[in-house]
Image (tube, rainbow, N blue to C red):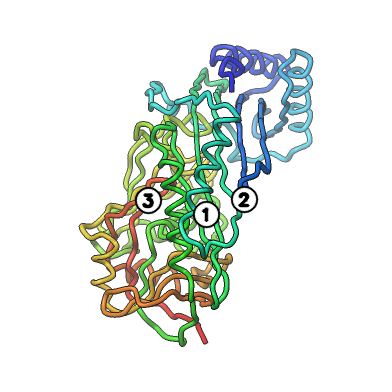
Amino acid sequence: MSHDIIKDQASLESVAAQVLELAKAQGASAAEAALSEELGLSVNVRLGDVETIEFNKDKGLGITVYFGQRKGTASTGDFSTGALEDAVRAACSIATFTAEDPYAGLADADRMATEIPDLDLYYPWDVSPETAIELATECEDAARGYDERISNSEGASLSSHEGTRVYANSHGFMGGYSTSRHSMSCSVIVEDDNGMQRDYWYSVARDRHDLEAAAAIGEKTAARTLQRLGGRRIDTCKVPVLFSADVAGSLVSHMISGIRGGSLYRKSSFLLDKLGEQIFPAFVHIHERPHMKKVLGSAPYDSEGVATYERDLVRDGVLQSYVLDSYSARKLKMESTGNSGGVHNVLIEPGELDQAALLREMGTGLLVTELLGMGVNIVTGDYSRGAAGFWVENGVIAYPVDEITIASHLGDMFMQLQAVGNDIDHRSNIKCGSLLIDAMTIAGS
């Protein structure tokens, strides 16, 4: 890929300034513009053959205008003067048809990021399709050659993407930065007399040098898949459950969904009115760290230009803060928390034990390594999902299990958290170790 295709930040800022001027000329009382230009390559190989090679080169602009409390939005992928004029005109026209909303408007001017720290987020990789195919093939070959029981493959993929984003508004805020994201993944199928199983593994990073080696990803995929052979159902029971690190983050994500402004002002959250109340045991500390360098979830400001900052979501088990953009904050008579567009690096502080030690701590119960289905109700907190993993006896994995359902209530699960592992999965925006829950109902045979 050639990196000179990506427009430099200055030229995107120039387009943003032009759009804001056009909005002002049309009589808008306020306006904001978000621009992006992105470039990427993705390859997929399966059973040694190239299945797909995709190049993408995209650019886009979203313009939002305000006429008092009336709002209109339009977008375009064409940065020519005529197209920009058309987009602004369209947004202004839409605003004339919308109802007044007393909570609409730009984020408060005094919350704009005044300094934009360099968070070390841009590591371009000038990878050729040939090299990408070689690496994906090496990854799949390592998995397929690991054991003769690996009968089939869903393939291996490599992707490399980079881009520049700029956000500007009529408060005078203008910010932009470039990012990169590279990943490699593999998925295979194993078969024996008891049937077939599949599993996968992936690695993702800002900097390609931080990716796991292609062969290592393939071997880990194969080992994980082989472990699942001979999976069986278990009798219905109520036992402790240990969520492995790569699925445990989903529990924290359900908490975040419950404290989002939209869920709160609609009164559709099981965590409504829980601010300042105990929702986890006292040892639990969950915080947001948006300025971690070289990390996928980092951002100097949110999608409204509001400065991001380190803060506690949960301290000593007590809910300290919500997750708000400026609109939901106004609805709730609160302040934006810099979370327009989502959270940035949520970390649940790890304990001292790794997964093996947590299994010993659990004794007998279920280790969950895969979750299936969408049976989580953020309004009521009811939790019921298909799962697969391993039955554990006397702190040791006994055999794989599948075709089971695990169920509880999120509020109970949070309060019954026994321990947080130190085996943090850093690949996600939510950085979490294994989580040991005191008891859940397992629906089996």
Residue at 38%, 32% (x, y): give it.
294
| Residue to which mark 3 is pinned | 425
Distance from the alpha carbon under mark 1 to that under mark 2: 8 Å
| Residue to which mark 1 is pinned | 144
User: Tag 2's secondary structure?
Assistant: loop
| Residue to which mark 2 is pinned | 47
Relative horizontal placement of residue 278, taking residue 406 as reference (left or right)? left
Distance from the alpha carbon under mark 2 to that under mark 3: 29 Å
The N terminus, quarter of image: top right
Residue 145, given in percent of the width and then of the height, sits at 49, 54
Task: Name the residue nearer the viewer: 392 or 289.
Answer: 392
Mark 3 burial class by Cα count in 10 Å: few <14, some 14-19, many 20+: some
Give the mark nearer the N terminus: 2 vs 3: 2
Relative horizontal placement of residue 117, taking residue 198 as reference (left or right)? left
Residue 33, given in percent of the width and then of the height, sits at 62, 25
Relative horizontal placement of residue 282, taking residue 171 as reference (left or right)? left
Give the mark nearer the N terminus: 3 vs 1: 1
Mark 2 burial class by Cα count in 10 Å: few <14, some 14-19, many 20+: some
Mark 1 burial class by Cα count in 10 Å: few <14, some 14-19, many 20+: many
Q: Amino acid at mark 2?
A: Leu
Relative horizontal placement of residue 362, taking residue 220 as reference (left or right)? left
Residue 220, given in percent of the width and then of the height, sits at 42, 54
Task: Name the residue nearer the viewer: 266 or 232.
Answer: 232
Residue at 41%, 49% (x, y): give it.
430
Q: What is the total number of numbered labels drawn onto the structure image?
A: 3
Q: Are marks 1 and 2 in contact (CB under 8 Å)?
A: yes
